[in-house]
Every structure is written in C-alpha cells, then in structure tokens.
Image (spheres, grey):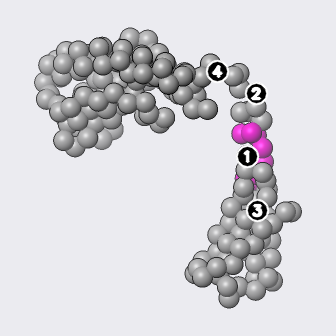
Amino acid sequence: MNTEIIKSNRRTIELKICTDGHIRVRAPFYMTDAEIADFLNKKANWIAKHRTRMKERQQKKAQETPVQQLSPQDIRALADQAMQIIPDKVRFYAEKIGVDYGRVTIRNQKTRWGSCSAKGNLNFNCLLMLTPEDVQDYVVIHELCHRKEMNHSPRFWSEVAKIMPDYKNSKIWLKENGNDIIRRMLG
C-alpha cells in the first residue's frame, strides 16, 4: 500500500485516499511510526472499501458518453436567452403565488439550477435554457415558493404543488438529466 506520511504541527491524524489510489496521512509530529502503522491497520477495511468505491466511480466516469462542451459564446447566448425568458416567468408565477421578490440574476452555475436569498433575490442557471419549458417553470416556482417557506418542509412542497401539481415529474427530469447538462459546462 503506497502511503505518504506528512508530519506537521497539528493535533489530530488525518487519512485521505488520493485519486491515484495512494494514501496520504497527516499526523502530529509527536506520533511515532508505530502509532501511525497501528492507525492504518485499524482503518484497513475503511481504506479498502473507499478505494473500491473510488475505482468504481472512475470506471463509471470513463464509460460516460462524452458530451459536447459549451463554448463561452454558447454560455453567453444561453444567458441572453434566459434574460429574455426567466424574468417574465418570475413575474407571472410571483403573481400567482402571491409573493414579491428582489433582483433576478442569470448565472452559469455548476451545482444549482436556482436559488433564493433571504432578501428575495433570485438566481437562475443559464443552462435552464437547455431543459424543457415545464422544468424551467418548476425551477422558477420552486424558488418563488421559498419566499413563503425558506426550507424544503412539507409546507414548502405543498406551496409548490398548489401551482404545479405535477412538479415531481420535473424534479425527476432534473435528477435524471441535469448532470448531463451541467457536464457540458465543466471541462
């Protein structure tokens, strides 16, 4: 087992499995090599399990079909398109839901489709333009419903369902297809 040991002025021991499979141990200066070896022996099952998971993830990633990456021009065009569409959807659904809101901003985010700040400012991912219209509506409704409930409680989902009774279809669509869309921006 390829192990890198780094001693420093720290209080605890840290174990990390690096992407190439080697193990990095960060330990306090006062720990002896025997104590570190004992720690690694106690963690042997954990190490084996996580190395296996890492290999499976790497194999899965290698099998993923390549996606066409979006150029900076493509992203700008999607952001421009979103600025033409999303604010109108926000106005329409805010009136239906009975809430107010602050600024509407379009971004190219790698982890979120939308967000709502405590002040009511709304952010939306420009990549929404690559999703079906009902999914765009769902994300807008979802964020606007946070103006009533700043959480994901049953009351929040009840608010979403009042406006979009079949919201779960859009939620599932995003779960099944969203990563492929976001992968087009990463890379």
1 or 2: mark nearer the eye: 2
Cα distance in 3D space between marks 1 and 2? 15 Å
The label number, if any, that marks residue 71 in the structure image: none
Mark with earlier residue (4, 3): 3
Q: Which residue is drawn at 78% across and 44% down?
A: 55
**Residue 126 lies in magenta, yes or no?**
no
Residue 169 shows in this picture:
no
* Apparent side of residue 146 relative to residue 40 in the rendered image (left or right): left
The three-letter code of the residue at mark 4 reads: Val
The three-letter code of the residue at mark 2 reads: Gln
* Residue 45 spot, x, y in % from top left: 77, 61
Cα distance in 3D space between marks 4 and 1? 24 Å
The residue positioned farthest toward the bottom in the image shown: 30
Mark with earlier residue (4, 1): 1
Give, as a single range, the part of the protein colored magenta: 49-58
The residue positioned farthest toward the front in the image shown: 73
Cα distance in 3D space between marks 2 and 4? 12 Å
Cα distance in 3D space between marks 2 and 3? 25 Å
| Label 2 crowd (10 A; few <14 / some 14-19 / many >=20) | few
**Residue 57 lies in magenta, yes or no?**
yes
| Label 4 crowd (10 A; few <14 / some 14-19 / many >=20) | few
* Apparent side of residue 34 relative to residue 132 in the rendered image (left or right): right
The label number, if any, that marks residue 67 in the structure image: 4
Element under label 2? Answer: helix
